[in-house]
Every structure is written in C-alpha cells, then in structure tokens.
Amino acid sequence: MKILILGSGGREHALAWKISQSPLVDEVYSAPGNPGMDKIGPCFDLDVTDLMAVQELALQIMPDLIIIGPEAPLAAGASDALRARGFDVFGPSQQAAQLETSKGFAKDLMQKYGVPTAEYGRFDDLTEALEFLETMNAPYVIKADGLAAGKGVVIAETLEEAENTVEEFMTGKFGEASSEIVIEEFLKGEEASIFVMTDGEGAIYLPVAQDHKRVGDGDVGPNTGGMGAYAPAPVVDARTLELVQATIVEPMLSGMAEDEMPYQGVLYVGIMVTEAGPKVVEFNARFGDPECQVLMAGLPGDIVPALLVCATGGLVSAHADLCEMMGLSDFKPSAVVVMAANGYPGTAEKGTVIKGVEIANALDGVTVFQAGTDVNDQGELVAAGGRVLGVTAVGDDLRMAISKAYDGVAAIEWTGGFYRKDIGHRVLK
Ligand code: AMP
Ligand code: GLY
C-alpha cells in the first residue's frame, strides 16, 4: 500500500514514522515533508494549499490513502478535490473543517446541538460587539472568527483592553479572518485535548493528551503552537470522558451527519474541565501538534487500518478490531519536549546548526520528530522554523517518559534553541 501525507511538521513526521512501521505499507510519500520525513520515504516540495499541484502529485503517485496533516489544506478544500478524483482521504471536507476555520460556525453548531461550551456572541458589527462586551464580566475572551496562525484569541483582563482588542480585530488586524469575531465567557479549569478518529458515524477515542501552550516555564509568556505534551492525561477521568462522549462528540457527529456535512478524519476537541463538567474551548479539524507525536509514539500497534476505515466508512462494525490492531489498551505513557528556535513565537532565528539527533534517537524509548528543520550546503541539520524538534519518549509511566524525553533533549547539541523544563508539571506534582 502507498500512503501520501500532506504537511511538514512534527505531527506529520510522527504520522509518517508510525505508518511506515505497518506491514500493510510499502511506501510513505510526503509533501512537502521535512528532513526527518525524507529518511522515511520520498518528499515532494509543493504548497499543500495549491490544489492543482496536490492533485497532480496524487495522480502521479496514485496512493491508496492520503492523510492531510495541517488545517491550511483542509481550509483550501484539498480533501474535497482529492475525493472528487477518487482518492481515499483521511481529513474532513472543507465544509466540515469549518469547525476549526470559523469559530462562529463552530459555536452556532454547538448551540444547535446543545453541546456544552462558553456562552457567546458572534458579531460582524463593531457597535454591537462593543455593546455586548458591556454585558459580560472580566476576563473577556475575544476570538477572530477565521484562522489567525494561533494568534486569534485574546483574553483581556479589563474592559478597556477588551474594547481595544475588539476594535483592532474588526478593523483589519487579521484581515478577513477577524472582520467577524466571537466574544465568549471565560471558562475556569484545566485544559485537555481529546482526539476522536471517525468515519462520520463511529468513533475511536485516542488517549487524552495535555499540551503546554505558553512559551515559558510555569505557563507564562505568549501562546505558542504547543511546547510539549504528554498522554494519557489523568485530568480527564472515566466519568469526564463519558460526559465528553455523550454531551460533546456524539451530538456533534450525529448532528453533522444529519445536516449532511458528515465529519471524517480526526476531530480534536479542546476542552476545559470545569466544575460544571467538560466544556468545549475549541475544535480543530486535525491532529494536534505536538499531541500527535505522543499519540503515535505511545500506540504499540498498527494505526493504518483505522486511518483507512475512517476514510472509507464502516467504523462502527470494525471498531473493536481496529482498536485492538492499534494496541489502544496497551498505550505506552508518552511525553514530548519541543525544542524551538530562539525568538519563537516571535521571529525565529534560522540556520543554526543542530547536532546529536542520532545520539538522542539511539537512547532507549526516545524518538526525535523533526518540524522546522532543513539541511544546509554542508549537509548539516539546521533550524528553519519556530518549533524545530519534538523529542519524544515512552516509558513505563509518565514520570519515566518525561525523564527519558529530557535525556533525549540533553543529547541534542544546539545553541540556537530553547525548550521548557517543566513539561508534565501537572502530573509530576
Ligand atoms: P483557542 O485557539 O480557541 O484554543 O484558544 C487559545 C487558548 O485560549 C486556549 O487554549 C485556552 O487556553 C484559551 N481560551 C480560549 N477560549 C477560552 C475560554 N472561553 N475560557 C478560557 N480560556 C480560553
Ligand atoms: N497543540 C495545539 C494545536 O495543535 O492546535
């Protein structure tokens, strides 16, 4: 079987690594991929939002399954274009991906299906938005409706700051993406990431992960794409997970199927575990990054059959077999520490030389996933993006997994980067 993966981050490297271990798979192709993915199979340099280029590549390779990693090609309609060409695709349609690409769309659907989430208002008129703010209490949560590279959410402590943010957003800060906004109630609690693989009808729940979004130790500083993660995250106990299934995932999947926009692929449910139970903070239409890295590292079995069934249908009847093939009940506790280039999440320094990846990879239980990396003219691995490496490890328990991940980090020689030293602090307490 031939599999094509679209994307170039740590998430896609982890998927390629896992998929390449399947006895069903002969070759893993990536576009555009990265130097880590290049060691697994051929990489093709292209813009994954260029639908013509993506279709041409698929027609050239004729893969048995195409996996769309990031949100940008989903937003551009890559899954629809590829399905129209007859390919099996793991990833939602452009319409269903609006769960991530339009916060207002997601909120309206949650309201329609009675899914617990923060109270909200949706606005394209500045005066109405400012009036609504007056009715809310601090802290104020303001969200750009569209994709804003992870910078579209502001939590304002004062009314003045909130008003300024609303004005900035609606007068063009993120262009079209913020001309419409959502203002919502602040939810108190601990966050967790739930990943559900689905064909639109059945659902496989992967172990719950927890991300570390802030750049600095102790959860301080600006938001990032995620500086580290671990799974399984004990913050979501069996009772909370039952509530997530019954009050969030099942109504969303059945509602969307009934509304003729079935959701296929992986649904990422960002929840806040509040005193009143789990509530949705956001949906994403893809695997989280770095969460995907711990999920792939910790799954002992073969994920390919489940990916295929999500793309083609039939999950309900195959559910038990797919979970067993994936080794879901033997998931190994897993942690990832992200190494980022100096300057991230602002302008990241490029071109600094990274050594020791092979040494880290040789450590027991450690796998280094690459993200923003490149190879220079001397053949050395260099930084080429914000988040650069995901040093991932499995262990007998989370404490051991985290400790091994940091052993891996210690083996990396890179003066141009930094990492958080407290990944997993909530479980190590
Ligand atoms: P989002 O892009 O929607 O995930 O928002 C980014 C981050 O802002 C989330 O991971 C939360 O930490 C925080 N956040 C978003 N919405 C809320 C909310 N209603 N209450 C509290 N925190 C929130
Ligand atoms: N790690 C958070 C995300 O992928 O959105």
Image (cartoon, helix red, strand yellow):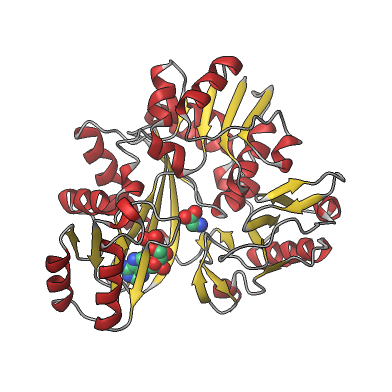
In the rendered image, which quarter is residue 188 located in?
Answer: bottom left
The answer to whether residue 154 shows anywhere in this view is yes
- Horizontal side of 407 relative to 120 (left or right) equals right
Q: Position of residue 366 (x, y in %)?
A: 75, 54
Q: Nearer the viewer, residue 68 or 72?
A: 72
Image quarter in which the C terminus is found: bottom right
> Residue 168 versus residue 149: which sits nearer the camera?
168
Does 177 sit left or right of 114 as displayed? Answer: right
Please indicate whether residue 251 sits to the left or right of residue 2 in the image: left
- Up-down relation of residue 214 to residue 325 (above or below): below
Q: Quadrant of the N terminus?
A: top right
Q: Camera-side residue: 397 or 254?
A: 254
Q: Identify the residue shown where x is 14% and y is 71%.
A: 132
Whether residue 236 is visible: no
For image coordinates 80% across by 66% down, the residue present is 410
Residue 387 pos. (x, y %): 62, 57
